[in-house]
Protein backbone atom coordinates (compact mmCIF):
# COMPACT_ATOMS: atom_id res chain seq x y z
CA UNK A 1 0.00 0.00 0.00
CA UNK A 2 2.82 2.40 0.80
CA UNK A 3 2.10 6.10 1.21
CA UNK A 4 -0.83 6.14 -1.21
CA UNK A 5 -3.27 5.87 1.68
CA UNK A 6 -2.46 9.40 2.84
CA UNK A 7 -2.97 12.79 1.13
CA UNK A 8 -0.14 13.84 -1.17
CA UNK A 9 1.32 17.16 -2.24
CA UNK A 10 -1.47 17.50 -4.78
CA UNK A 11 -3.78 18.39 -1.88
CA UNK A 12 -1.26 20.92 -0.59
CA UNK A 13 -0.24 18.61 2.27
CA UNK A 14 2.31 15.85 2.57
CA UNK A 15 1.97 12.65 4.58
CA UNK A 16 3.98 14.25 7.39
CA UNK A 17 1.39 17.03 7.70
CA UNK A 18 -1.50 14.65 8.45
CA UNK A 19 -2.54 12.66 11.51
CA UNK A 20 -5.44 10.22 11.68
CA UNK A 21 -7.74 8.90 14.40
CA UNK A 22 -10.13 5.95 14.48
CA UNK A 23 -13.61 7.38 14.09
CA UNK A 24 -15.03 5.36 16.97
CA UNK A 25 -12.52 7.03 19.33
CA UNK A 26 -13.61 10.47 18.16
CA UNK A 27 -17.22 9.71 19.09
CA UNK A 28 -16.24 8.33 22.50
CA UNK A 29 -12.82 9.32 23.86
CA UNK A 30 -10.30 8.15 26.44
CA UNK A 31 -10.30 9.52 30.01
CA UNK A 32 -8.83 13.00 30.46
CA UNK A 33 -7.63 12.20 33.97
CA UNK A 34 -6.54 9.01 35.73
CA UNK A 35 -9.78 7.23 36.78
CA UNK A 36 -7.92 5.64 39.70
CA UNK A 37 -8.54 2.22 41.24
CA UNK A 38 -11.91 1.39 39.67
CA UNK A 39 -12.68 -1.91 37.87
CA UNK A 40 -14.13 -0.24 34.76
CA UNK A 41 -14.34 3.28 33.29
CA UNK A 42 -17.19 4.26 30.95
CA UNK A 43 -17.81 7.15 28.52
CA UNK A 44 -21.18 7.59 26.78
CA UNK A 45 -22.24 9.58 23.74
CA UNK A 46 -25.94 9.14 23.12
CA UNK A 47 -26.50 5.45 22.45
CA UNK A 48 -22.77 4.68 22.03
CA UNK A 49 -20.69 3.54 24.99
CA UNK A 50 -16.95 3.14 25.43
CA UNK A 51 -15.92 0.84 28.29
CA UNK A 52 -12.30 0.39 29.35
CA UNK A 53 -10.88 -2.10 31.84
CA UNK A 54 -7.26 -1.67 32.96
CA UNK A 55 -4.69 -4.28 31.98
CA UNK A 56 -2.52 -6.50 34.14
CA UNK A 57 1.09 -7.62 33.83
CA UNK A 58 3.68 -9.48 35.85
CA UNK A 59 4.89 -7.68 38.96
CA UNK A 60 8.54 -6.71 38.24
CA UNK A 61 9.31 -7.34 41.92
CA UNK A 62 7.60 -10.73 42.03
CA UNK A 63 6.68 -12.44 38.77
CA UNK A 64 4.49 -14.94 40.62
CA UNK A 65 1.79 -12.28 40.87
CA UNK A 66 0.03 -9.94 38.44
CA UNK A 67 -0.53 -6.24 39.08
CA UNK A 68 -2.95 -3.72 37.59
CA UNK A 69 -1.06 -1.14 35.51
CA UNK A 70 -3.90 1.40 35.29
CA UNK A 71 -5.83 3.21 32.57
CA UNK A 72 -4.58 5.00 29.45
CA UNK A 73 -5.52 8.68 29.80
CA UNK A 74 -4.55 12.26 28.97
CA UNK A 75 -2.73 13.86 26.05
CA UNK A 76 0.10 11.33 25.84
CA UNK A 77 -2.23 8.36 25.31
CA UNK A 78 -4.05 10.32 22.60
CA UNK A 79 -0.83 11.26 20.78
CA UNK A 80 0.22 7.60 20.86
CA UNK A 81 -3.13 6.58 19.35
CA UNK A 82 -2.81 9.21 16.62
CA UNK A 83 0.65 7.88 15.74
CA UNK A 84 -0.51 4.24 15.71
CA UNK A 85 -3.46 5.01 13.43
CA UNK A 86 -1.47 7.30 11.11
CA UNK A 87 1.48 4.92 10.78
CA UNK A 88 -0.80 1.95 10.14
CA UNK A 89 -2.66 3.82 7.43
CA UNK A 90 0.67 4.86 5.90
CA UNK A 91 2.22 1.39 5.84
CA UNK A 92 -0.90 -0.72 5.49
CA UNK A 93 0.61 -3.23 7.92
CA UNK A 94 -0.54 -4.33 11.41
CA UNK A 95 3.05 -4.62 12.68
CA UNK A 96 4.48 -1.23 13.68
CA UNK A 97 8.16 -0.65 14.44
CA UNK A 98 8.51 1.78 17.35
CA UNK A 99 12.30 2.24 17.28
CA UNK A 100 15.43 1.13 19.12
CA UNK A 101 15.12 3.75 21.86
CA UNK A 102 12.30 5.34 23.79
CA UNK A 103 13.61 8.75 22.67
CA UNK A 104 13.16 7.73 19.02
CA UNK A 105 9.53 6.91 19.66
CA UNK A 106 8.95 10.10 21.66
CA UNK A 107 10.18 12.21 18.74
CA UNK A 108 7.73 10.41 16.45
CA UNK A 109 4.96 11.61 18.77
CA UNK A 110 6.18 15.21 18.70
CA UNK A 111 7.40 14.99 22.31
CA UNK A 112 10.91 16.27 22.98
CA UNK A 113 12.94 13.99 25.29
CA UNK A 114 14.20 15.81 28.37
CA UNK A 115 16.74 15.12 31.09
CA UNK A 116 14.18 14.57 33.83
CA UNK A 117 13.95 11.25 35.63
CA UNK A 118 11.45 9.60 37.93
CA UNK A 119 7.81 8.63 37.57
CA UNK A 120 6.74 12.04 36.23
CA UNK A 121 9.37 12.32 33.50
CA UNK A 122 8.15 12.54 29.91
CA UNK A 123 9.94 9.27 29.08
CA UNK A 124 8.16 7.39 31.87
CA UNK A 125 4.85 8.94 30.87
CA UNK A 126 5.16 7.77 27.25
CA UNK A 127 6.32 4.29 28.26
CA UNK A 128 3.57 3.96 30.87
CA UNK A 129 0.73 5.19 28.60
CA UNK A 130 1.85 2.96 25.72
CA UNK A 131 1.79 -0.09 27.98
CA UNK A 132 -1.61 0.86 29.36
CA UNK A 133 -3.04 1.20 25.84
CA UNK A 134 -1.60 -2.16 24.81
CA UNK A 135 -2.86 -4.07 27.84
CA UNK A 136 -6.27 -2.40 28.34
CA UNK A 137 -9.50 -4.09 27.36
CA UNK A 138 -11.53 -1.66 25.23
CA UNK A 139 -15.16 -2.30 24.26
CA UNK A 140 -17.51 -0.28 22.04
CA UNK A 141 -21.26 -0.80 22.49
CA UNK A 142 -24.31 0.65 20.73
CA UNK A 143 -27.99 0.47 21.54
CA UNK A 144 -30.10 -0.21 18.42
CA UNK A 145 -33.77 0.53 17.81
CA UNK A 146 -35.85 -0.24 14.71
CA UNK A 147 -39.58 0.23 15.11
CA UNK A 148 -40.76 -1.97 17.96
CA UNK A 149 -37.46 -3.86 18.00
CA UNK A 150 -34.59 -3.06 20.31
CA UNK A 151 -31.11 -4.53 20.24
CA UNK A 152 -27.62 -4.21 21.64
CA UNK A 153 -24.45 -4.38 19.54
CA UNK A 154 -20.98 -4.47 21.06
CA UNK A 155 -17.48 -5.53 20.08
CA UNK A 156 -14.07 -5.60 21.70
CA UNK A 157 -11.51 -3.21 20.23
CA UNK A 158 -8.19 -3.94 21.97
CA UNK A 159 -5.30 -2.01 20.45
CA UNK A 160 -2.68 -4.77 20.19
CA UNK A 161 -2.41 -8.55 20.25
CA UNK A 162 1.37 -8.70 20.70
CA UNK A 163 4.20 -6.37 21.68
CA UNK A 164 7.96 -6.33 22.21
CA UNK A 165 9.20 -3.31 24.16
CA UNK A 166 12.96 -3.25 24.63
CA UNK A 167 13.46 0.18 26.17
CA UNK A 168 15.03 1.69 29.26
CA UNK A 169 12.79 4.49 30.58
CA UNK A 170 15.64 5.61 32.86
CA UNK A 171 17.79 6.38 29.80
CA UNK A 172 15.50 7.17 26.90
CA UNK A 173 18.39 7.72 24.46
CA UNK A 174 19.86 4.26 25.08
CA UNK A 175 19.80 2.18 21.89
CA UNK A 176 18.64 -1.42 22.33
CA UNK A 177 19.98 -4.33 20.31
CA UNK A 178 16.56 -4.90 18.74
CA UNK A 179 13.72 -2.72 17.49
CA UNK A 180 10.67 -2.47 19.70
CA UNK A 181 7.40 -3.23 17.92
CA UNK A 182 3.72 -3.95 18.40
CA UNK A 183 1.27 -6.00 16.35
CA UNK A 184 -2.20 -4.50 16.21
CA UNK A 185 -5.31 -6.46 17.05
CA UNK A 186 -7.18 -7.53 13.89
CA UNK A 187 -10.38 -5.56 14.64
CA UNK A 188 -8.46 -2.41 15.59
CA UNK A 189 -6.45 -2.74 12.36
CA UNK A 190 -9.69 -3.02 10.34
CA UNK A 191 -11.20 -0.03 12.16
CA UNK A 192 -8.17 2.06 11.15
CA UNK A 193 -8.83 1.25 7.49
CA UNK A 194 -12.50 2.27 7.85
CA UNK A 195 -12.83 6.02 7.27
CA UNK A 196 -10.40 7.46 9.83
CA UNK A 197 -10.72 11.14 10.74
CA UNK A 198 -7.82 13.23 9.32
CA UNK A 199 -6.44 16.29 11.11
CA UNK A 200 -3.41 18.55 10.69
CA UNK A 201 -0.35 17.47 12.62
CA UNK A 202 0.65 21.10 13.28
CA UNK A 203 -2.68 21.84 14.97
CA UNK A 204 -2.53 18.58 16.90
CA UNK A 205 0.85 19.51 18.35
CA UNK A 206 -0.35 23.05 19.15
CA UNK A 207 -3.13 21.49 21.28
CA UNK A 208 -1.12 18.58 22.71
CA UNK A 209 -1.10 19.88 26.30
CA UNK A 210 -4.90 19.68 26.51
CA UNK A 211 -6.74 16.33 26.21
CA UNK A 212 -9.98 18.30 25.87
CA UNK A 213 -8.48 20.40 23.08
CA UNK A 214 -7.39 17.28 21.19
CA UNK A 215 -10.85 15.74 21.56
CA UNK A 216 -12.69 18.89 20.49
CA UNK A 217 -10.40 19.36 17.48
CA UNK A 218 -11.28 15.89 16.15
CA UNK A 219 -14.95 16.53 16.99
CA UNK A 220 -14.98 19.91 15.19
CA UNK A 221 -13.30 18.31 12.18
CA UNK A 222 -15.95 15.59 12.02
CA UNK A 223 -18.77 18.11 12.49
CA UNK A 224 -17.32 20.28 9.72
CA UNK A 225 -17.24 17.25 7.44
CA UNK A 226 -20.96 16.70 8.20
CA UNK A 227 -21.71 20.38 7.51
CA UNK A 228 -19.93 20.12 4.17
CA UNK A 229 -21.61 16.82 3.28
CA UNK A 230 -25.16 17.87 4.22
CA UNK A 231 -24.70 21.55 3.32
CA UNK A 232 -26.18 22.75 6.58
CA UNK A 233 -25.01 23.61 10.05
CA UNK A 234 -25.94 22.10 13.39
CA UNK A 235 -26.51 23.39 16.90
CA UNK A 236 -24.96 21.30 19.69
CA UNK A 237 -25.91 22.02 23.30
CA UNK A 238 -23.17 22.48 25.87
CA UNK A 239 -24.96 19.89 27.98
CA UNK A 240 -24.49 17.27 25.27
CA UNK A 241 -20.82 18.18 24.80
CA UNK A 242 -20.30 18.04 28.55
CA UNK A 243 -21.81 14.54 28.65
CA UNK A 244 -19.68 13.47 25.68
CA UNK A 245 -16.32 14.97 26.67
CA UNK A 246 -16.30 16.53 30.10
CA UNK A 247 -18.00 14.44 32.75
CA UNK A 248 -14.75 14.16 34.72
CA UNK A 249 -13.85 17.84 34.26
CA UNK A 250 -15.98 19.25 37.04
CA UNK A 251 -19.06 21.44 36.96
CA UNK A 252 -20.99 22.20 33.78
CA UNK A 253 -20.02 25.90 33.80
CA UNK A 254 -16.34 24.99 34.24
CA UNK A 255 -16.56 22.69 31.22
CA UNK A 256 -18.20 25.41 29.10
CA UNK A 257 -15.45 27.88 29.97
CA UNK A 258 -12.70 25.38 29.17
CA UNK A 259 -14.41 24.18 25.98
CA UNK A 260 -14.80 27.75 24.67
CA UNK A 261 -11.10 28.39 25.30
CA UNK A 262 -10.06 25.25 23.39
CA UNK A 263 -12.52 25.82 20.53
CA UNK A 264 -11.19 29.36 20.09
CA UNK A 265 -7.67 27.93 19.82
CA UNK A 266 -8.93 25.44 17.24
CA UNK A 267 -10.56 28.16 15.10
CA UNK A 268 -7.40 30.27 15.37
CA UNK A 269 -5.29 27.37 14.05
CA UNK A 270 -7.93 26.16 11.56
CA UNK A 271 -9.72 29.13 9.94
CA UNK A 272 -11.84 26.82 7.75
CA UNK A 273 -13.58 25.45 10.87
CA UNK A 274 -16.35 27.95 11.62
CA UNK A 275 -18.19 27.84 14.95
CA UNK A 276 -20.36 30.36 16.78
CA UNK A 277 -20.99 30.40 20.52
CA UNK A 278 -24.67 30.84 21.27
CA UNK A 279 -26.78 30.70 24.38
CA UNK A 280 -26.80 27.11 25.58
CA UNK A 281 -24.38 25.70 23.05
CA UNK A 282 -22.22 26.02 19.95
CA UNK A 283 -23.38 26.37 16.36
CA UNK A 284 -21.41 24.55 13.67
CA UNK A 285 -21.93 26.92 10.73
CA UNK A 286 -23.04 25.67 7.32
CA UNK A 287 -19.85 27.06 5.75
CA UNK A 288 -17.56 25.17 8.13
CA UNK A 289 -14.99 22.97 6.37
CA UNK A 290 -12.51 20.43 7.71
CA UNK A 291 -8.94 21.62 7.25
CA UNK A 292 -8.02 18.23 5.77
CA UNK A 293 -10.33 16.76 3.14
CA UNK A 294 -11.49 13.21 3.83
CA UNK A 295 -11.82 12.75 0.06
CA UNK A 296 -8.06 12.73 -0.18
CA UNK A 297 -8.02 9.43 1.72
CA UNK A 298 -8.41 6.39 -0.48
CA UNK A 299 -11.65 4.52 0.13
CA UNK A 300 -11.54 1.33 2.15
CA UNK A 301 -14.13 -1.39 2.56
CA UNK A 302 -16.00 -1.05 5.86
CA UNK A 303 -15.53 -4.04 8.13
CA UNK A 304 -18.90 -5.58 9.14
CA UNK A 305 -18.12 -5.18 12.86
CA UNK A 306 -17.64 -1.41 12.51
CA UNK A 307 -20.58 -0.72 10.19
CA UNK A 308 -23.27 0.02 12.82
CA UNK A 309 -20.94 2.49 14.57
CA UNK A 310 -19.70 4.16 11.38
CA UNK A 311 -23.30 4.72 10.24
CA UNK A 312 -23.78 7.13 13.15
CA UNK A 313 -21.02 9.39 11.80
CA UNK A 314 -22.56 9.70 8.35
CA UNK A 315 -25.84 11.20 9.58
Image (spheres, rainbow, N blue to C red):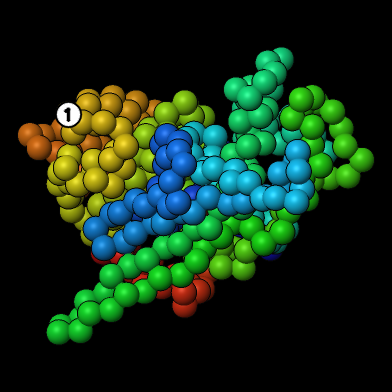
Q: Residue at x 46, y 74 (%)?
A: 305
Measuring from the top left, give residue 126's x and y in whole percent: 63, 34
Measuring from the top left, give residue 70's x and y in whole percent: 54, 43
Q: What element carries label 1?
A: helix
Whether residue 267 sits left or right of residue 188 in the image: it is left
Q: Residue at x 60, y 43 (%)?
A: 69
Measuring from the top left, give residue 267's x and y in whole percent: 32, 30
The reply to whether residue 86 is visible in this rendering is: no
Q: Which residue is drawn at 36% across and 74% down?
A: 153
Q: Which corner quadrant of the image does residue 98 belong to?
A: top right
Furthest residue in direction right, as rendered: 177
Whether residue 99 sits left or right of residue 265 in the image: it is right
Which is nearer the eye, 156 or 39? 39
User: Is 290 located above or below residue 303 in the figure?
Assistant: above
Furthest residue in direction bottom, as rendered: 148
The reply to whether residue 51 is visible in this rendering is: yes
Q: Quadrant of the C terminus?
A: bottom left
Q: Which residue is drawn at 63% across and 37% down?
A: 128
Furthest residue in direction top, as rendered: 115
Which residue is tagged 1? 253
Q: Which corner quadrant of the image does residue 253 belong to?
A: top left
Measuring from the top left, give residue 295's x and y in whole percent: 45, 58
User: Is 142 located above or below residue 147 in the figure?
Assistant: above
Amino acid sequence: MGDKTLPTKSSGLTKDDIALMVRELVLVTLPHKDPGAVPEWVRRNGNITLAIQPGYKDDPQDNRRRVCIGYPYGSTARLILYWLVTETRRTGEPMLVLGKSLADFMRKLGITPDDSTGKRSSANSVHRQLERLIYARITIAKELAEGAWNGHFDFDLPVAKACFLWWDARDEEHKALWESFIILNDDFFKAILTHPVPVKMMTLLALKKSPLGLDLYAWATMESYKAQHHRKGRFVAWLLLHDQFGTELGRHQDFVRNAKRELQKIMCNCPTIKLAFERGGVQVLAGSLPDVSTRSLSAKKICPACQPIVAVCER
